Amino acid sequence: MKEGIHPDYRYVVFEDESAGFRFLSRSTVKTNDKTQWTDGNTYPLYKLEISSASHPFFTGKQKLMDTAGRVDRFRKRYGQAGQTAAG
């Protein structure tokens, strides 16, 4: 194999910020943050917005994250939830 062309494949801690869920896996993701894992070693930290701990498909709970009123604008434009075009 050629030297210097492969990404750095190492252990990384992934943290779901919304659920407080963390897991250790191997990855080539680039990050500057570091954290200490339960084994006492320090690993790079990559922060996630969503994971299996917070995704509605896996949790069975629907979280509505409205940023800048997008849902409200949609409901004003197209009507309230539960209404159909056929009426």
Image (tube, helix red, strand yellow):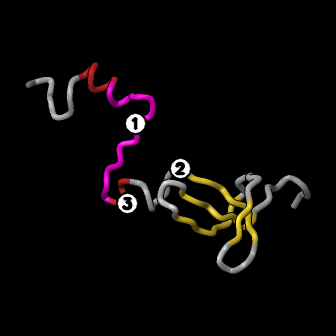
Residue 35 picture location, percent across and down? 71, 65
**Quadrant in the rendering for residue 77:** top left
Element carrying mark 3: helix
Q: Residue at x 25, y 22 (%)?
A: 78
Q: Residue furthest bottom?
A: 39
User: What are the residue bounds of the magenta stretch?
Assistant: 60-72
Q: Nearer the viewer, mark 2 or mark 1?
A: 1
Q: Nearer the viewer, mark 3 or mark 1?
A: 1
Mark before the other along the chain sequence, 2 or 1: 2
Q: Which mark is residue 66?
A: 1
Mark before the other along the chain sequence, 3 or 1: 3
Please name the predominant secondary structure of the magenta segment in the image: loop
Real-space Cα distance between discs 3 and 1? Answer: 20 Å
What amino acid is labelled 3 in the image? Phe
Real-space Cα distance between discs 3 and 2? Answer: 15 Å
Q: Which residue is mark 3?
A: 58
Element carrying mark 1: loop
* 87 is higher (above) or lower (below) than 38: above
Element carrying mark 2: loop
Q: Residue at x 45, y 62 (%)?
A: 53
Is residue 55 found left or right of 45 in the rendered image? left
Quadrant showing the N terminus? bottom right
Q: Which residue is mark 2?
A: 49
